[in-house]
Image (tube, rainbow, N blue to C red):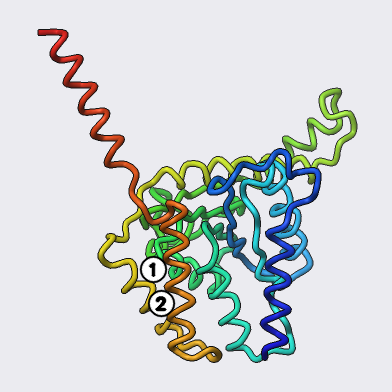
Amino acid sequence: MANNRDDTNAILDTHTELDPSQHDNISHPPQSYTYYHAGPLFTLAELHTNTLLSQAIQRKSRGKFIPILPQDLEQRDLSPQSIRDEDLRALLACDLAMFTYDGAELDAGTVVEYMVSKMADIPAVILRSDFRGAGDQGGKGDSWNLMSSCWPRTVGISVDAMFEYKSSLSRSIGTEGNGTNPGENMVEEIAQKVLDGFERVLKEPPRLPKELRESVYHWLALMPGFKNGGDQQNAELLAKLCSDKQAKGLLTDHTGSHHIRKLRCVRRLAARVK
């Protein structure tokens, strides 16, 4: 199993390294973030779309948002639990996460990963590109099951993929597109929407209180019943992740000082009026 973990670490390293041409443009830490690119990964279309969209997100963000794809981590010679464990560890290690919520019924594994991300207070973007109506919210909310909606630190993005494709197709055959690929144009447009969602959700304050952070992450190390590593090793790993996220500002509420400055400004304006 040690070799398998080494292989996984090598893949993670590959995905957190940038193309040499991007080094001059990447934001300095802590303004670069890894994100877990979650969604169905069972068909050619799904695997291909995950790859193209994640590449577009990293490219358009100039390396600010670096994707970790579970389809690149999975090793088919592992047991089902080992595959699950590696995916959960990768999710918990990432700074943000994106979840593809397509289909008349949501992919069950993606929903589980989304809920784990909320337990860890990970900022998340949910992307739905399926133009078919779905869910149980009667058109008054999201196009997916109500129990997966209304969670903090989550930005939902709904895109009509067919409309986006037709728009890209019109541009590609006109003078504006100069014969560009409509599929690529569509992916670029959707990637920008995801980037905007990441930027929005990063501004939302964490929900996890300071006094509970270490305890919650300790429980997250025990809760899944990871097959390898043992409770002590997994607890140490999650404790380090918790510390790293706090150092990066992902579990630190910066809104307090902002509100204080805003209140002081209002008071000064009120004093001038008087």
Label 2 sits on a secondary structure element that is helix
Of the 4 image quadrants, the one containing the N terminus is bottom right
Q: Which mark is residue 255?
A: none
- The residue sitting at the top extreme is 273
Of the 4 image quadrants, the one containing the C terminus is top left
Label 1 sits on a secondary structure element that is helix
Which quadrant holds residue 122?
bottom left
Amino acid on which the number 1 mark rests in the picture: Met
Q: Residues within 10 Å of mark 2 (few under 14, many from 20)?
A: some
Q: Is residue 164 visible?
A: no
Q: Which mark is residue 119?
A: 1
Residue at image position (45%, 79%) is 236
Amino acid on which the number 2 mark rests in the picture: Leu
On screen, residue 206 versus residue 49, left or right, reads left
Q: Earlier in the sequence, mark 1 or mark 2?
A: 1
Which quadrant holds residue 223?
bottom left
Mark 2 sits on what residue? 220
